Image (cartoon, rainbow, N blue to C red):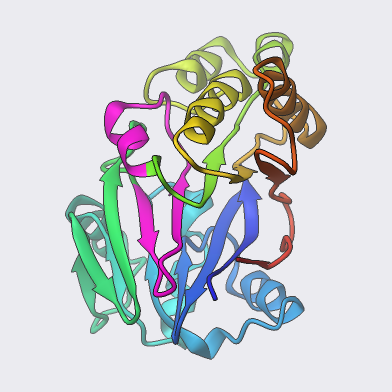
Amino acid sequence: MSRLCPLFSSSKGNSIYISGGSTALLVDAGVSYKRLCNAMQARNLPMEDLQGILITHEHSDHIMGLEVLLKRLDIPVYASRETLEYLCASGKIPSGRTLVDCAGTFTIGDIEVTAFDTPHDAVHSLGFRFSMPDERVIGVATDLGHISGTVEHHLTGCDLILLESNYDQRMLEFGPYPYPLKRRIRSSTGHLSNDDCSETISRLIRSGSTYFVLGHLSEQNNLPEIAYQTSSQKLAEQSMRERLDYILHVAPAQGPGEVMAF
């Protein structure tokens, strides 16, 4: 059985638990080690079962707890070469840890992982496609200013997809952020809006995907109910019926969501 649990998912911290067969992985560690431990314990997910951590990119909301985590657990770190070099140079990875440049497709235990580029203003940002031992496929793509052909290709056909739905366009436009930051968020290497997320989901449903989790919501420029409504309304306009054609969740920002087993 395949499992995914969004432990934290917001502009203030991100971490996702994924397991299948005898393999358990973490994607990002963007909150303190203590908070990660508490979140996993709350969902009966043993920290000692982790066999690796995958890092999407080097921004603090994805690596805040990494250094302490690696001091407690001797597990490999999977990231792009550029991200690994940055993390080592900044002292975020203790010496002696196994580092894996995760270009292309590789295997961790029972799970086959494909890393793909995401358009974000980082040294090198990645999304991941997980081919699970029960033949289910999970896709994770956050921190992307637009849906590139590469991103859509790797998400197409996934059974479950955690996709960024970062901001509501009106909330961002009339919100407190200074103009340069607004421009950065809206840029092609910034973050994905609710509208763009909803359009992407509609295409992915037509390609066979059914289970979606909206993630990485901005706490300043979005609300869970707005993100959810934007996607559900878009899908309803195209005669797609929730719980018949698709299932839609919003990942909690500041604590673990439900463990999704499928």
- Based on the picture, tell me whether residue 145 belongs to the magenta stretch: yes
Q: Residue sitting at 31 percent across and 78 percent down?
A: 76
Q: Residue sitting at 50 percent across and 52 percent down?
A: 159
Q: Nearer the viewer, residue 148 or 179?
A: 148
Residue 182 found in image quarter: top right
Point out residue 189 in the picture as x, y percentages from the top left corner.
37, 25
Q: Nearer the viewer, residue 119 or 84?
A: 119
Decide if residue 97 is in sight here: yes
Q: Which residues are magenta?
A: 127-154
- Based on the picture, tell me whether residue 3 belongs to the magenta stretch: no
Decide if residue 55 is in sight here: no
Q: Residue sitting at 50 percent across and 88 percent down?
A: 49
Point out residue 115 in the picture as x, y percentages from the top left corner.
28, 53
Q: Nearer the viewer, residue 159 or 11?
A: 159
**34 up-or-down from 233: above or below:** below
Point out residue 100 in the picture as x, y percentages from the top left corner.
21, 69
Q: Quadrant of the N terminus?
A: bottom right
Q: Residue furthest right?
A: 225
**115 up-or-down from 260: above or below:** above
**214 up-or-down from 94: above or below:** above
Q: Residue sitting at 60 percent across and 66 percent down?
A: 262
As drawn, is 118 to the left or to the right of 169? left
Marks counted in the figure total 0
Q: Nearer the viewer, residue 16 or 241?
A: 241
